[in-house]
Image (tube, helix red, strand yellow):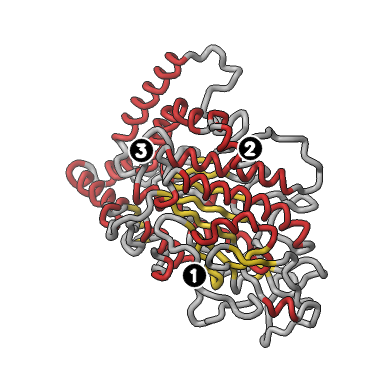
Amino acid sequence: MHNDSPFHRPHGRPDVSRREFLWRSGGGLGGIALAAMLRGETQAASVAPDPKSAFAFKPKAKRVIQLFMSGAASHLDLWDFKPALVKHHGKPSNFGEHVEAFQDGLGPWLKPVWDFSPHGQCGKMLGETVAPLGAHVDDIAFIHNVVSKSGVHSQATLQQATGFVLPGFPGAGCWVSYGLGSMNENLPAFVVLPDHRGFASNGVKNWDAAFLPSQHSGTVIYPGTDSPIADLHPHKAGSYITPASEAEAHALMASLNRSHAKTRDEDQRLDARIKSYELAAKMQLAAPEALNLKTEPAHVMKLYGLDRGPQTWPKEINADEEAYYFSQKCLAARRLLERGVRFVQIWSGNDNSFPRRNWDSHEDIQRDHGPLSNGMARGAAALIADLKQRGMLDDTIILWTTEFGRMPSSQGGKGRDHNPFVFTNWLCGGGIKGGIVAGESDEWGYKPLDRANPTQVYDIHATMLRLLGLDHTKLTWRHNGIDRRLTDVHGHVIKSLLA
Protein backbone atom coordinates (compact mmCIF):
# COMPACT_ATOMS: atom_id res chain seq x y z
CA MET A 1 0.00 0.00 0.00
CA HIS A 2 1.26 3.42 -0.91
CA ASN A 3 2.19 5.63 2.03
CA ASP A 4 2.57 9.40 1.55
CA SER A 5 3.58 10.02 5.17
CA PRO A 6 6.78 12.03 5.56
CA PHE A 7 7.83 9.39 8.11
CA HIS A 8 7.63 6.53 5.61
CA ARG A 9 10.97 5.00 4.68
CA PRO A 10 10.77 2.45 1.81
CA HIS A 11 12.82 -0.69 2.31
CA GLY A 12 16.48 -0.25 1.38
CA ARG A 13 16.50 3.53 1.52
CA PRO A 14 18.58 5.34 4.17
CA ASP A 15 16.92 7.37 6.89
CA VAL A 16 16.13 10.92 5.85
CA SER A 17 18.22 13.63 7.42
CA ARG A 18 16.83 15.47 10.40
CA ARG A 19 16.70 18.70 8.37
CA GLU A 20 14.74 16.98 5.59
CA PHE A 21 12.42 15.37 8.16
CA LEU A 22 11.67 18.75 9.75
CA TRP A 23 10.91 20.33 6.40
CA ARG A 24 8.65 17.50 5.29
CA SER A 25 6.78 17.37 8.57
CA GLY A 26 6.52 21.12 9.23
CA GLY A 27 7.33 23.06 6.10
CA GLY A 28 7.46 26.84 5.81
CA LEU A 29 7.76 28.96 8.94
CA GLY A 30 6.45 26.13 11.10
CA GLY A 31 9.30 23.90 9.97
CA ILE A 32 11.83 26.66 10.56
CA ALA A 33 10.50 27.27 14.06
CA LEU A 34 10.57 23.57 14.83
CA ALA A 35 14.11 23.29 13.53
CA ALA A 36 15.22 26.22 15.66
CA MET A 37 13.56 24.72 18.72
CA LEU A 38 15.23 21.33 18.23
CA ARG A 39 18.57 22.97 17.52
CA GLY A 40 18.30 24.71 20.88
CA GLU A 41 17.50 21.40 22.57
CA THR A 42 20.51 19.77 20.89
CA GLN A 43 22.80 22.54 22.02
CA ALA A 44 21.41 22.38 25.54
CA ALA A 45 22.15 18.66 25.63
CA SER A 46 25.87 19.20 25.11
CA VAL A 47 27.01 22.77 25.47
CA ALA A 48 29.62 24.58 27.52
CA PRO A 49 29.43 27.78 29.46
CA ASP A 50 32.30 30.16 28.89
CA PRO A 51 35.24 28.37 30.57
CA LYS A 52 36.51 31.78 31.70
CA SER A 53 33.76 31.64 34.34
CA ALA A 54 35.79 28.92 36.04
CA PHE A 55 38.70 31.29 36.69
CA ALA A 56 38.35 32.09 40.36
CA PHE A 57 41.90 32.14 41.71
CA LYS A 58 45.27 33.60 40.88
CA PRO A 59 47.04 30.72 39.11
CA LYS A 60 50.25 29.41 40.59
CA ALA A 61 50.85 26.97 37.74
CA LYS A 62 50.52 27.02 33.96
CA ARG A 63 50.97 23.36 33.08
CA VAL A 64 50.92 19.79 34.38
CA ILE A 65 52.95 16.61 33.96
CA GLN A 66 51.18 13.45 35.09
CA LEU A 67 53.38 10.41 35.66
CA PHE A 68 51.15 7.32 35.56
CA MET A 69 52.45 3.92 36.76
CA SER A 70 50.18 1.42 35.05
CA GLY A 71 49.42 -1.80 36.91
CA ALA A 72 49.45 -0.50 40.51
CA ALA A 73 52.76 0.47 42.08
CA SER A 74 53.39 -0.65 45.64
CA HIS A 75 53.34 2.27 48.06
CA LEU A 76 54.75 -0.02 50.74
CA ASP A 77 57.99 -0.77 48.88
CA LEU A 78 58.62 2.70 47.46
CA TRP A 79 57.20 5.59 49.51
CA ASP A 80 55.24 4.58 52.62
CA PHE A 81 57.55 2.97 55.19
CA LYS A 82 55.85 0.73 57.76
CA PRO A 83 58.04 -0.47 60.66
CA ALA A 84 55.25 -2.83 61.73
CA LEU A 85 55.74 -4.85 58.54
CA VAL A 86 59.45 -5.19 59.31
CA LYS A 87 58.71 -6.24 62.89
CA HIS A 88 56.03 -8.78 61.96
CA HIS A 89 57.47 -10.02 58.67
CA GLY A 90 56.49 -13.61 57.95
CA LYS A 91 53.83 -13.76 60.66
CA PRO A 92 50.21 -14.55 59.72
CA SER A 93 48.42 -11.42 58.58
CA ASN A 94 45.42 -10.24 60.57
CA PHE A 95 43.46 -7.26 59.26
CA GLY A 96 40.85 -7.31 62.01
CA GLU A 97 38.07 -7.63 59.45
CA HIS A 98 37.02 -9.68 56.45
CA VAL A 99 39.05 -8.71 53.38
CA GLU A 100 37.94 -9.14 49.79
CA ALA A 101 41.26 -9.65 48.03
CA PHE A 102 41.47 -9.62 44.24
CA GLN A 103 43.48 -12.88 44.01
CA ASP A 104 43.28 -14.04 47.63
CA GLY A 105 46.71 -12.55 48.32
CA LEU A 106 46.32 -12.70 52.10
CA GLY A 107 49.49 -14.56 53.03
CA PRO A 108 51.84 -13.58 55.87
CA TRP A 109 52.89 -9.97 56.41
CA LEU A 110 55.55 -8.96 53.89
CA LYS A 111 58.13 -6.34 54.82
CA PRO A 112 59.38 -3.86 52.19
CA VAL A 113 61.60 -5.69 49.74
CA TRP A 114 64.08 -2.79 49.84
CA ASP A 115 65.58 -1.01 52.80
CA PHE A 116 64.29 2.49 53.52
CA SER A 117 66.43 5.47 54.49
CA PRO A 118 65.74 9.16 55.26
CA HIS A 119 66.29 11.88 52.66
CA GLY A 120 66.31 15.66 52.57
CA GLN A 121 65.84 18.11 55.39
CA CYS A 122 62.34 16.71 55.91
CA GLY A 123 63.80 13.24 56.53
CA LYS A 124 61.34 11.49 54.20
CA MET A 125 61.87 7.74 54.16
CA LEU A 126 62.25 6.28 50.66
CA GLY A 127 62.83 2.76 49.44
CA GLU A 128 66.32 2.12 48.09
CA THR A 129 65.14 1.67 44.52
CA VAL A 130 63.62 5.19 44.35
CA ALA A 131 66.52 6.83 46.18
CA PRO A 132 67.41 8.98 43.11
CA LEU A 133 64.39 11.11 44.06
CA GLY A 134 65.82 11.65 47.53
CA ALA A 135 67.53 14.85 46.39
CA HIS A 136 64.11 16.36 45.67
CA VAL A 137 61.89 15.21 48.56
CA ASP A 138 61.95 18.72 50.06
CA ASP A 139 60.04 19.83 46.94
CA ILE A 140 57.58 16.91 47.04
CA ALA A 141 54.31 16.45 48.95
CA PHE A 142 53.36 12.82 49.56
CA ILE A 143 49.75 11.74 50.07
CA HIS A 144 49.62 8.27 51.66
CA ASN A 145 45.87 7.99 52.27
CA VAL A 146 44.50 7.99 48.69
CA VAL A 147 41.67 5.51 48.09
CA SER A 148 40.19 4.02 44.93
CA LYS A 149 36.60 3.07 44.18
CA SER A 150 37.70 -0.11 42.45
CA GLY A 151 40.31 -2.86 42.67
CA VAL A 152 39.92 -3.62 38.96
CA HIS A 153 42.67 -2.16 36.76
CA SER A 154 40.46 -0.77 34.00
CA GLN A 155 38.02 0.98 36.31
CA ALA A 156 40.64 2.30 38.72
CA THR A 157 42.80 3.57 35.86
CA LEU A 158 39.84 5.43 34.41
CA GLN A 159 39.14 6.99 37.78
CA GLN A 160 42.66 8.34 38.08
CA ALA A 161 42.73 9.48 34.45
CA THR A 162 39.18 10.84 34.05
CA GLY A 163 37.61 11.04 37.52
CA PHE A 164 35.08 8.28 36.73
CA VAL A 165 35.23 4.48 36.89
CA LEU A 166 33.14 4.17 33.72
CA PRO A 167 34.27 5.05 30.19
CA GLY A 168 32.81 7.99 28.31
CA PHE A 169 34.28 10.87 30.30
CA PRO A 170 37.05 13.29 29.31
CA GLY A 171 40.57 12.82 30.60
CA ALA A 172 41.98 15.31 33.09
CA GLY A 173 44.20 16.76 30.36
CA CYS A 174 41.13 17.33 28.20
CA TRP A 175 39.54 19.42 30.94
CA VAL A 176 42.72 21.46 31.34
CA SER A 177 42.87 21.99 27.58
CA TYR A 178 39.23 23.09 27.53
CA GLY A 179 39.60 25.35 30.55
CA LEU A 180 42.91 27.02 29.72
CA GLY A 181 43.34 26.60 25.97
CA SER A 182 46.68 26.38 24.25
CA MET A 183 49.74 28.56 24.75
CA ASN A 184 51.01 27.59 21.28
CA GLU A 185 48.60 27.36 18.35
CA ASN A 186 51.08 25.10 16.52
CA LEU A 187 51.09 22.37 19.17
CA PRO A 188 48.29 20.50 20.97
CA ALA A 189 47.39 21.52 24.51
CA PHE A 190 47.31 17.90 25.73
CA VAL A 191 49.99 15.35 24.80
CA VAL A 192 50.23 11.68 25.80
CA LEU A 193 53.55 9.80 25.88
CA PRO A 194 52.63 6.11 26.23
CA ASP A 195 54.92 3.35 27.35
CA HIS A 196 56.81 2.31 24.23
CA ARG A 197 55.52 -1.26 24.65
CA GLY A 198 51.83 -0.48 24.49
CA PHE A 199 48.80 1.21 26.05
CA ALA A 200 47.52 0.82 29.60
CA SER A 201 44.08 -0.56 30.48
CA ASN A 202 41.34 1.23 28.48
CA GLY A 203 43.78 2.52 25.86
CA VAL A 204 42.71 5.84 24.34
CA LYS A 205 39.69 6.09 26.66
CA ASN A 206 42.09 7.40 29.31
CA TRP A 207 42.75 10.57 27.31
CA ASP A 208 39.77 10.83 24.95
CA ALA A 209 37.75 14.06 25.01
CA ALA A 210 34.44 12.12 25.20
CA PHE A 211 31.66 14.74 25.06
CA LEU A 212 34.05 17.71 25.02
CA PRO A 213 35.04 18.93 21.54
CA SER A 214 37.47 16.40 20.12
CA GLN A 215 40.31 18.90 19.68
CA HIS A 216 40.81 18.58 23.45
CA SER A 217 41.73 14.87 23.18
CA GLY A 218 45.28 13.86 23.98
CA THR A 219 47.68 13.66 21.04
CA VAL A 220 49.77 10.48 21.24
CA ILE A 221 53.51 10.93 20.65
CA TYR A 222 56.35 8.40 20.74
CA PRO A 223 59.60 10.33 21.35
CA GLY A 224 62.80 8.90 19.91
CA THR A 225 61.10 6.93 17.12
CA ASP A 226 61.31 7.49 13.37
CA SER A 227 57.68 8.68 13.32
CA PRO A 228 56.86 10.14 16.75
CA ILE A 229 53.41 11.25 15.57
CA ALA A 230 51.52 8.83 13.34
CA ASP A 231 50.44 10.09 9.91
CA LEU A 232 51.70 13.63 10.48
CA HIS A 233 53.64 13.56 7.21
CA PRO A 234 52.82 11.87 3.87
CA HIS A 235 53.82 8.23 3.56
CA LYS A 236 57.12 7.65 1.79
CA ALA A 237 55.19 6.03 -1.06
CA GLY A 238 53.63 9.40 -1.79
CA SER A 239 56.75 10.87 -3.35
CA TYR A 240 54.59 12.76 -5.83
CA ILE A 241 53.18 14.94 -3.00
CA THR A 242 54.86 18.34 -2.86
CA PRO A 243 54.53 21.01 -0.16
CA ALA A 244 52.56 23.15 -2.59
CA SER A 245 50.13 20.37 -3.59
CA GLU A 246 49.64 19.39 0.06
CA ALA A 247 48.87 23.01 1.01
CA GLU A 248 46.36 23.23 -1.85
CA ALA A 249 44.72 19.99 -0.72
CA HIS A 250 44.43 21.33 2.84
CA ALA A 251 42.86 24.54 1.56
CA LEU A 252 40.34 22.62 -0.56
CA MET A 253 39.43 20.32 2.33
CA ALA A 254 38.99 23.30 4.66
CA SER A 255 36.69 24.99 2.16
CA LEU A 256 34.57 21.87 1.65
CA ASN A 257 34.42 21.12 5.37
CA ARG A 258 33.32 24.62 6.27
CA SER A 259 30.68 24.66 3.54
CA HIS A 260 29.40 21.36 4.92
CA ALA A 261 29.51 22.69 8.49
CA LYS A 262 27.32 25.68 7.62
CA THR A 263 24.40 23.32 7.01
CA ARG A 264 24.96 21.60 10.36
CA ASP A 265 25.60 24.44 12.78
CA GLU A 266 24.24 22.39 15.68
CA ASP A 267 26.88 19.67 15.25
CA GLN A 268 30.14 20.64 16.94
CA ARG A 269 31.98 17.48 15.90
CA LEU A 270 32.75 18.70 12.41
CA ASP A 271 34.14 21.99 13.68
CA ALA A 272 36.36 20.06 16.09
CA ARG A 273 37.56 17.85 13.25
CA ILE A 274 38.38 20.87 11.11
CA LYS A 275 40.41 22.34 13.96
CA SER A 276 42.23 19.02 14.36
CA TYR A 277 43.16 19.00 10.66
CA GLU A 278 44.37 22.59 10.90
CA LEU A 279 46.47 21.78 13.97
CA ALA A 280 48.00 18.76 12.21
CA ALA A 281 49.12 21.00 9.36
CA LYS A 282 50.73 23.45 11.80
CA MET A 283 52.39 20.61 13.71
CA GLN A 284 54.24 19.48 10.59
CA LEU A 285 56.67 22.31 11.24
CA ALA A 286 56.48 22.74 15.02
CA ALA A 287 56.45 19.13 16.25
CA PRO A 288 59.69 17.86 14.64
CA GLU A 289 61.62 20.74 16.19
CA ALA A 290 60.03 20.20 19.61
CA LEU A 291 60.79 16.48 19.57
CA ASN A 292 64.34 16.70 18.29
CA LEU A 293 66.13 15.71 21.50
CA LYS A 294 69.51 15.74 19.74
CA THR A 295 69.56 19.51 19.86
CA GLU A 296 69.91 19.42 23.64
CA PRO A 297 73.36 20.34 25.04
CA ALA A 298 75.62 17.58 26.31
CA HIS A 299 75.11 18.41 30.00
CA VAL A 300 71.33 18.03 29.67
CA MET A 301 71.64 14.71 27.86
CA LYS A 302 73.96 13.54 30.63
CA LEU A 303 71.51 14.70 33.29
CA TYR A 304 68.83 12.47 31.78
CA GLY A 305 71.26 9.60 31.14
CA LEU A 306 70.76 9.97 27.39
CA ASP A 307 74.39 10.74 26.56
CA ARG A 308 74.70 7.16 25.36
CA GLY A 309 72.37 5.87 22.65
CA PRO A 310 70.03 2.90 23.16
CA GLN A 311 71.84 -0.39 23.50
CA THR A 312 70.99 -3.99 22.81
CA TRP A 313 69.36 -4.63 26.14
CA PRO A 314 69.22 -8.14 27.63
CA LYS A 315 65.92 -9.98 27.45
CA GLU A 316 65.34 -9.76 31.18
CA ILE A 317 63.88 -6.56 32.54
CA ASN A 318 66.67 -4.04 33.03
CA ALA A 319 66.80 -0.83 35.11
CA ASP A 320 69.09 0.96 32.64
CA GLU A 321 66.69 0.26 29.79
CA GLU A 322 63.71 1.46 31.82
CA ALA A 323 65.61 4.60 32.82
CA TYR A 324 66.57 5.33 29.21
CA TYR A 325 63.06 5.18 27.79
CA PHE A 326 61.38 6.88 30.75
CA SER A 327 63.99 9.66 30.77
CA GLN A 328 63.52 10.10 27.03
CA LYS A 329 59.85 10.78 27.62
CA CYS A 330 60.63 13.12 30.51
CA LEU A 331 62.98 15.21 28.37
CA ALA A 332 60.44 15.30 25.53
CA ALA A 333 57.82 16.43 28.05
CA ARG A 334 60.01 19.31 29.22
CA ARG A 335 60.60 20.44 25.63
CA LEU A 336 56.86 20.31 24.89
CA LEU A 337 55.94 22.20 28.05
CA GLU A 338 58.40 25.00 27.43
CA ARG A 339 56.88 25.39 23.96
CA GLY A 340 53.38 25.89 25.32
CA VAL A 341 51.82 22.44 25.80
CA ARG A 342 49.53 22.54 28.84
CA PHE A 343 49.30 18.92 29.96
CA VAL A 344 51.69 16.02 29.33
CA GLN A 345 50.86 12.50 30.48
CA ILE A 346 53.72 9.99 30.75
CA TRP A 347 52.88 6.31 31.12
CA SER A 348 55.12 3.59 32.54
CA GLY A 349 54.79 -0.17 32.38
CA ASN A 350 52.31 -1.50 29.84
CA ASP A 351 53.75 -4.85 28.77
CA ASN A 352 51.99 -8.06 29.82
CA SER A 353 54.71 -10.41 28.59
CA PHE A 354 56.55 -12.62 31.07
CA PRO A 355 58.47 -11.74 33.09
CA ARG A 356 56.02 -8.89 33.28
CA ARG A 357 57.17 -5.34 32.54
CA ASN A 358 54.37 -3.57 34.30
CA TRP A 359 53.63 -2.70 37.91
CA ASP A 360 51.07 -5.47 38.53
CA SER A 361 53.45 -7.51 40.70
CA HIS A 362 51.41 -10.46 41.90
CA GLU A 363 54.35 -12.84 41.56
CA ASP A 364 57.54 -11.00 42.48
CA ILE A 365 57.75 -7.38 43.65
CA GLN A 366 61.53 -7.24 43.58
CA ARG A 367 61.82 -8.62 40.04
CA ASP A 368 59.10 -6.39 38.58
CA HIS A 369 59.21 -3.18 40.61
CA GLY A 370 62.99 -3.00 40.84
CA PRO A 371 63.87 -1.98 37.26
CA LEU A 372 60.62 -0.07 36.71
CA SER A 373 60.85 2.00 39.87
CA ASN A 374 64.56 2.72 39.59
CA GLY A 375 64.18 3.74 35.94
CA MET A 376 61.20 5.94 36.80
CA ALA A 377 63.01 7.55 39.74
CA ARG A 378 66.08 8.38 37.67
CA GLY A 379 63.97 9.95 34.91
CA ALA A 380 61.70 11.85 37.32
CA ALA A 381 64.67 13.14 39.32
CA ALA A 382 66.28 14.46 36.13
CA LEU A 383 63.00 16.09 35.11
CA ILE A 384 62.63 17.89 38.45
CA ALA A 385 66.26 19.06 38.36
CA ASP A 386 65.90 20.25 34.75
CA LEU A 387 62.67 22.14 35.40
CA LYS A 388 64.20 23.70 38.50
CA GLN A 389 67.33 24.93 36.76
CA ARG A 390 65.17 26.54 34.05
CA GLY A 391 62.84 28.23 36.52
CA MET A 392 59.93 26.12 35.24
CA LEU A 393 59.25 24.06 38.36
CA ASP A 394 57.61 27.07 40.01
CA ASP A 395 54.75 27.01 37.50
CA THR A 396 54.67 23.32 36.54
CA ILE A 397 52.76 20.72 38.57
CA ILE A 398 54.15 17.19 38.59
CA LEU A 399 51.59 14.58 39.66
CA TRP A 400 52.74 11.00 40.25
CA THR A 401 49.97 8.42 40.41
CA THR A 402 48.93 4.83 39.90
CA GLU A 403 45.51 3.16 39.92
CA PHE A 404 45.75 1.66 43.43
CA GLY A 405 48.29 0.22 45.82
CA ARG A 406 49.32 -3.25 46.92
CA MET A 407 48.53 -5.28 50.02
CA PRO A 408 50.80 -5.48 53.09
CA SER A 409 50.32 -9.24 53.05
CA SER A 410 52.21 -11.49 50.66
CA GLN A 411 50.96 -13.35 47.62
CA GLY A 412 52.91 -16.48 46.76
CA GLY A 413 55.71 -15.40 49.07
CA LYS A 414 57.19 -12.66 46.86
CA GLY A 415 54.26 -10.76 45.37
CA ARG A 416 51.48 -8.50 46.58
CA ASP A 417 47.79 -8.41 45.67
CA HIS A 418 45.74 -5.35 44.71
CA ASN A 419 44.96 -2.80 47.42
CA PRO A 420 42.30 -0.26 46.43
CA PHE A 421 41.82 0.66 50.10
CA VAL A 422 44.87 2.93 50.28
CA PHE A 423 47.84 4.00 48.16
CA THR A 424 50.20 6.91 47.49
CA ASN A 425 50.23 9.90 45.16
CA TRP A 426 52.81 12.65 45.23
CA LEU A 427 52.94 16.17 43.81
CA CYS A 428 55.74 18.61 43.19
CA GLY A 429 56.23 22.18 41.94
CA GLY A 430 53.56 24.64 40.76
CA GLY A 431 52.40 26.00 44.14
CA ILE A 432 52.82 22.70 46.03
CA LYS A 433 54.24 22.85 49.56
CA GLY A 434 57.21 20.50 49.51
CA GLY A 435 58.73 18.29 52.19
CA ILE A 436 55.40 17.27 53.72
CA VAL A 437 53.09 14.30 54.07
CA ALA A 438 49.41 15.15 53.61
CA GLY A 439 47.44 12.15 54.81
CA GLU A 440 48.74 8.97 56.43
CA SER A 441 47.91 5.30 56.04
CA ASP A 442 47.49 3.00 59.04
CA GLU A 443 50.35 1.05 60.66
CA TRP A 444 50.15 -1.70 58.01
CA GLY A 445 49.58 0.50 54.96
CA TYR A 446 46.27 -1.29 54.50
CA LYS A 447 43.78 1.58 54.85
CA PRO A 448 43.85 5.31 55.68
CA LEU A 449 44.81 6.07 59.26
CA ASP A 450 41.71 8.27 59.48
CA ARG A 451 39.20 6.10 57.67
CA ALA A 452 36.53 8.78 57.86
CA ASN A 453 38.64 11.27 55.92
CA PRO A 454 40.57 9.62 53.09
CA THR A 455 41.90 11.49 50.09
CA GLN A 456 39.89 10.88 46.94
CA VAL A 457 41.13 11.37 43.39
CA TYR A 458 38.50 14.12 43.18
CA ASP A 459 40.42 16.04 45.85
CA ILE A 460 43.68 15.76 43.94
CA HIS A 461 42.01 16.88 40.71
CA ALA A 462 40.31 19.77 42.53
CA THR A 463 43.65 20.85 43.99
CA MET A 464 45.37 20.63 40.61
CA LEU A 465 42.69 22.82 39.00
CA ARG A 466 42.88 25.29 41.89
CA LEU A 467 46.62 25.71 41.33
CA LEU A 468 45.88 26.35 37.65
CA GLY A 469 43.50 29.13 38.72
CA LEU A 470 40.31 27.14 38.07
CA ASP A 471 37.36 26.40 40.34
CA HIS A 472 36.62 22.71 39.84
CA THR A 473 32.91 23.28 40.56
CA LYS A 474 32.60 25.81 37.73
CA LEU A 475 34.65 24.11 35.01
CA THR A 476 31.65 22.33 33.49
CA TRP A 477 30.17 21.11 30.23
CA ARG A 478 26.44 20.46 29.95
CA HIS A 479 25.92 16.97 28.55
CA ASN A 480 22.61 15.11 28.42
CA GLY A 481 21.07 17.62 30.78
CA ILE A 482 23.84 17.36 33.41
CA ASP A 483 26.59 19.87 34.16
CA ARG A 484 29.51 17.47 33.99
CA ARG A 485 32.89 18.21 35.52
CA LEU A 486 36.19 16.45 36.19
CA THR A 487 35.34 16.01 39.87
CA ASP A 488 31.77 14.79 39.29
CA VAL A 489 29.82 16.10 42.33
CA HIS A 490 32.72 15.60 44.73
CA GLY A 491 36.12 17.02 45.52
CA HIS A 492 37.73 19.39 48.01
CA VAL A 493 40.92 21.38 47.58
CA ILE A 494 43.62 19.92 49.83
CA LYS A 495 44.65 23.18 51.46
CA SER A 496 47.59 21.63 53.32
CA LEU A 497 49.25 21.07 49.92
CA LEU A 498 49.16 24.73 48.94
CA ALA A 499 52.38 26.67 49.41
Foreground of the two, 94 or 444: 444
- Of tags 2 and 3, which is closer to the observer? 2
Q: Is residue 221 visible?
A: yes
The residue under label 3 is which amino acid type? Asp
Foreground of the two, 422 or 256: 422
Residue at the spot 54% in from the left edge and 39% down from the top edge: 332
Residue at the spot 77% in from the left edge and 77% down from the top edge: 89
The answer to which quarter of the image holds residue 198 is: top right
Q: Which mark is residue 456?
A: 1
Q: Position of residue 72 (x, y in %)?
A: 64, 61
The residue under label 2 is which amino acid type? Leu
Is residue 281 found left or right of 71 in the rendered image? left
How packed is label 3: few (under 14 Cα within 10 Å), some, or many (20 or more)?
many
Instruction: Determine the CA span between mark 1 and mark 3.
Output: 36 Å
Q: Which residue is under mark 2?
A: 306
Q: Which one is earlier in the sequence, the residue at label 1 or at label 3?
A: 3
Foreground of the two, 428 or 241: 428
Which structural element holds mark 1? loop
Q: Position of residue 47 (x, y in %)?
A: 32, 52
Q: Which one is earlier in the sequence, the residue at label 2 or at label 3?
A: 3
Q: How many marks?
A: 3
Residue at the spot 59% in from the left edge and 53% down from the top edge: 202
Is residue 239 found left or right of 186 in the rendered image? right
Q: Which residue is under mark 3?
A: 271
Q: Position of residue 62 (x, y in %)?
A: 38, 49
Which structural element holds mark 3? helix
In this view, 466 is above or below 34: below
Q: Which mark is residue 365?
A: none
In this view, 460 is above or below 335: below
